[in-house]
């Protein structure tokens, strides 16, 4: 548990000092994963008085759920859902695992995404538990700290599969204290285009997989991308296509036997992933008929109505409404019928950056906003 239960800066310092890089990313020699963060979180929540349950999504990768029962009969369950993991640290220009201060900014991996919002929320919870309002409150507050959010919301998926439900879910993300009530879904696919290897001095004896892939790459750019952009949603706008990876060959003196294309596609409720996959299959059949398409990841879009009572309470202590192109645990909760939003201090523009930071004043504003939200729940 942190040396403080109500000071978000002190809490953040301890969180940043715990490396929790997800297993697929560079961890600068530290042990990757979320186990240390989960142990800290479980201890902290228990000390605050929560009933804590730990569940594994994989060995060494726990999610932590802490439940604060009200002193009266609960009329609603509201969950704060931070994630335990961060992206990698390769190329960072500030110490990754030591909170450093400069010109009002607090730097470190996760300071913005999402240990800063987590520290603000935990400070608010700590203050709430000491307040007079708690004695008459009838809201069950839950902290569900998930593993694997940066890898496709693995922890949140495991929770909902196991039956986790709430009346309202707040995924902690750096949203500038705007209430993100809608976000795009994600579809990521691999396309493997085969060729035939040969010596680079005799290219005519091989079948260059990169050359085989080029007509398909051009069709993705000229046909699929414009079609996606034209699919408009009144809140989320158009869909998008990013060709994020094009890999072919391994040595200069060999004809490539394989070319891999990695696509990151963002969709909305008016454009189904199934339709996009059908169009990809058609392009592959036309331009690279021997290629194989495989699904890497698929996650739903969501839109929570602005009239939802808990969303309105959060909006009242925040800075307005917003929609997002990015994906987070709110998408997973909303797909299970739970009204969900993303919310927290800090700017998404600083997430995953080489000098990641959150402004100290924003961290404090976040703690105040979370506290005001908890008080707005009131009593029965």
Image (tube, rainbow, N blue to C red):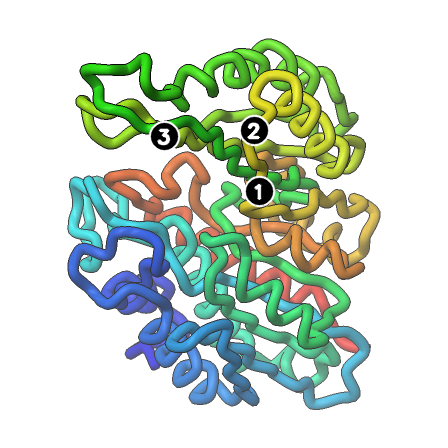
Q: Nearer the viewer, mark 2 or mark 1?
A: 2
Which residue occupies the extreme front position in the image? Answer: 205
Image position, residue 84 (x, y; %)? 42, 65
Image position, residue 154 (x, y; %)? 54, 61
Q: Residue at x 50, y 69 (%)?
A: 145
> Is 165 placed left or right of 207 in the picture?
right
Residue 257's mark?
A: 3
Q: Is residue 276 above or below residue 127?
A: above
Element on which disc 1 rests: strand
Q: Quadrant of residue 205?
A: top left
Q: How far is the residue under mark 3 from the one under mark 1?
A: 18 Å
Label 3 Cα crowd, 10 Å radius (few <14 / some 14-19 / many 20+): some
Please tell me how many numbered marks the rendered image carries.
3
Residue 290's mark?
A: 2
Is there a contact, CB below 8 Å, between mark 3 and mark 2?
no
Element on which disc 3 rests: loop
């Amino acid at each position: 548990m942190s040396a403080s239960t109500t000071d978000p800066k002190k809490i953040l310092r301890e969180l940043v000092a715990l490396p929790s890089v997800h297993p697929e990313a560079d961890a600068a020699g530290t042990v990757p994963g979320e186990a240390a963060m989960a142990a800290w979180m479980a201890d902290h929540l228990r000390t605050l008085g929560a009933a804590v349950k730990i569940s594994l999504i994989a060995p060494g990768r726990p999610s932590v759920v802490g439940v604060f029962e009200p002193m009266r009969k609960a009329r609603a369950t509201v969950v704060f859902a931070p994630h335990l993991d961060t992206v990698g640290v390769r190329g960072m220009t500030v110490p990754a695992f030591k909170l450093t201060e400069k010109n009002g900014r607090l730097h470190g991996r996760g300071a913005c995404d999402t240990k800063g919002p987590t520290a603000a929320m935990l400070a608010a919870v700590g203050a709430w538990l000491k307040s007079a309002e708690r004695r008459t409150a009838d809201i069950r507050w839950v902290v569900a700290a998930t593993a694997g959010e940066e890898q496709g919301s693995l922890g949140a998926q495991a929770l909902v599969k196991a039956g986790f439900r709430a009346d309202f879910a707040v995924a902690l993300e750096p949203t500038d204290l705007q209430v993100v009530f809608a976000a795009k879904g994600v579809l990521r696919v691999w396309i493997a285009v085969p060729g035939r290897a040969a010596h680079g001095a005799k290219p005519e004896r091989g079948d260059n997989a990169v050359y085989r892939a080029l007509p398909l790459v051009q069709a993705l750019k000229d046909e699929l991308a414009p079609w996606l952009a034209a699919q408009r949603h009144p809140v989320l706008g158009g869909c998008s296509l990013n060709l994020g990876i094009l890999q072919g060959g391994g040595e200069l003196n060999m004809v490539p036997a394989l070319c891999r294309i990695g696509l990151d596609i963002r969709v909305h409720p008016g454009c189904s992933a199934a339709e996009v996959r059908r169009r990809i299959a058609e392009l592959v059949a036309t331009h690279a008929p021997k290629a194989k398409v495989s699904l890497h990841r698929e996650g739903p879009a969501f839109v929570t109505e602005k009239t939802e009572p808990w969303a309105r309470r959060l909006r009242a202590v925040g800075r307005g409404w917003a929609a997002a192109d990015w994906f987070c645990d709110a998408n997973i909760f909303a797909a299970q019928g739970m009204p969900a939003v993303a919310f927290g201090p800090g700017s998404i523009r600083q997430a995953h950056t080489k000098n990641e930071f959150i402004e100290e004043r924003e961290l404090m504003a976040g703690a105040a906003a979370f506290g005001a939200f908890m008080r707005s729940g009131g009593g029965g």
